[in-house]
């Protein structure tokens, strides 16, 4: 029996799963939704190392980055992958197929229990995954594709700026490890930028019990703080940012194209996003992202306050993996004020 089938069977039997006792049930579109109360997963010891490699070869670059981490911890574990498939728009709006394939190819060496889970905000999720080739790539490496619009297990978290908390997908909450891959983009709908912290929005339910969580998020003057608060629900094993290209204006689906030719990786979302913001500034970006110190950006500031990652530029260590990345690394350090 597959691990996920075992988990779902245990839930049906009313078991206590991963620290969650599923206590509530509602109906939406004829489907049951089981909702549990969750415990935040904070970083007790933030790892501020951020690795950079300058390349246009995603396969080699992703492998080089992932080799900097002890992947033996993934062996035999259930690994959930969160990519960036908000819409059916090609990279850098969405995860590049070569990036997803490179990650899955490496994961397959360590485990047969891999899921790719997603909820698109600007399109039908299943259609987006099919049009972007993500479903075919996932199938090729034996990963299970989960469309979160049909997910029935959710974990509720309280958060200061969410009216009634938010619902986090059980598919991610139950995973032993989460690997996230994001893009380098600004966000014209109030987020200001959409990097690893913002990519977590696709792990949250759109509707439950008559409430539209995404309408609440995008209409709130506290949107960027709410984005940060979603990230209390999990701690990633690894974040990989594909910054070979990016949007320095517009976004998330279209915008002004830039070509930093970088792949970036780290365990700490605050550190990775701070590097991403610095990179956007270097290439010339929107006023909202350009103003003030990087750690005064609301997403980053709120995430640091919550203990999701590092709390200052001094805690970030930028490591260049090739000589071609050294010059931009120095510019990033200067932009961060380190």
Image: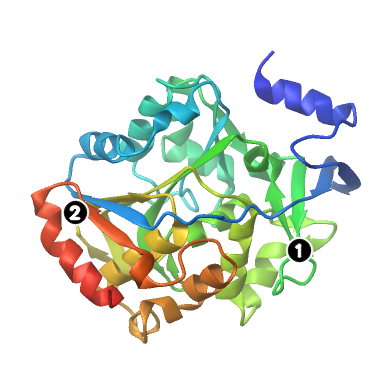
Label 2: how many Cα within 10 Å (few below 14, some 14–19, many 20+): some
In which quadrant of the rendered image does the C terminus lie?
bottom left
Label 1: how many Cα within 10 Å (few below 14, some 14–19, many 20+): some
Residue 89 point in image, percent of width and height = 40, 52
Task: Tally the numbered discs.
Answer: 2
Residue 65 point in image, percent of width and height = 29, 41
Give the vertical position of 127 relative to 208 (above or below).
above
Foreground of the two, 128 or 245: 245
| Alpha carbon separation for disc pair 2 and 1 | 39 Å
Which of the numbered marks, if any, corresponds to residue 103?
none
Q: Residue at x 85, y 57 (%)?
A: 209
Give the quarter of the image for residue 222. Answer: bottom right
Foreground of the two, 229 or 189: 229
Residue 97 point in image, percent of width and height = 35, 38
In the displayed structure, does residue 62 sit left or right of residue 142? left
Q: Secondary structure at mark 2?
A: loop
Give the quarter of the image for residue 43. Answer: bottom right
Foreground of the two, 69 or 223: 69
Decide which of tag 2 and tag 1 comes sooner along the chain.
1
Residue underneath mark 2: 261
Q: Secondary structure at mark 1?
A: loop
Give the vertical position of 114 relative to 221 (above or below).
above
In the displayed structure, does residue 154 sit left or right of residue 70? right
Q: Residue at x 9, y 51 (%)?
A: 323
Residue underneath mark 1: 158
**Residue 29 visible in this rendered orientation of the protein:** no
* Mark 2 or 1: the one toward you: 1
In the displayed structure, does residue 212 sit left or right of residue 188? right
Residue 123 point in image, percent of width and height = 55, 52
């Amino acid at each position: 029996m597959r691990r996920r089938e075992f988990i779902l069977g245990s839930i049906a039997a009313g078991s206590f799963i991963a620290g969650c006792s599923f206590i509530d049930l509602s109906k939406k579109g004829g489907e049951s939704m089981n909702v549990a109360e969750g415990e935040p997963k904070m970083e007790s010891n933030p790892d501020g190392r951020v690795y950079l490699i300058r390349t246009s070869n995603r396969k080699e670059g992703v492998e080089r980055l992932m080799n900097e981490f002890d992947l033996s911890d993934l062996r035999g574990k259930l690994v959930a992958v969160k990519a960036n498939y908000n819409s059916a728009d090609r990279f850098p709006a969405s995860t590049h197929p070569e990036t997803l394939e490179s990650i899955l190819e490496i994961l397959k060496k360590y485990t047969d229990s891999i899921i790719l889970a997603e909820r698109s905000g600007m399109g039908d999720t299943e259609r987006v995954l099919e049009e972007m080739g993500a479903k075919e790539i996932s199938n090729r490496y034996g990963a299970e594709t989960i469309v979160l619009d049909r997910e029935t297990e959710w974990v509720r978290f309280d958060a200061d700026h969410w009216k009634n908390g938010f619902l986090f997908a059980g598919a991610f909450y139950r995973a032993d490890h989460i690997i996230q891959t994001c893009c380098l983009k600004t966000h014209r709908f109030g987020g200001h930028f959409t990097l690893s912290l913002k990519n977590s929005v696709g792990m949250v339910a759109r509707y439950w019990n008559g409430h539209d969580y995404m309408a609440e998020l995008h209409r709130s003057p506290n949107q960027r703080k709410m984005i940060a608060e979603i990230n209390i629900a999990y701690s990633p094993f690894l974040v990989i940012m594909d910054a070979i290209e990016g949007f320095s204006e517009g976004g998330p689906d279209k915008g002004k194209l830039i070509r930093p030719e970088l792949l970036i990786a780290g365990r700490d979302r605050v550190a990775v996003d701070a590097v991403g913001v610095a990179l956007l500034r270097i290439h010339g970006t929107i006023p909202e992202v350009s103003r003030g110190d990087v750690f005064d950006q609301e997403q980053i500031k709120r995430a640091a306050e919550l203990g999701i990652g590092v709390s200052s530029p001094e805690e970030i260590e930028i490591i260049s993996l090739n000589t071609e990345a050294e010059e931009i690394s120095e510019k990033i350090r200067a932009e961060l004020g380190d």
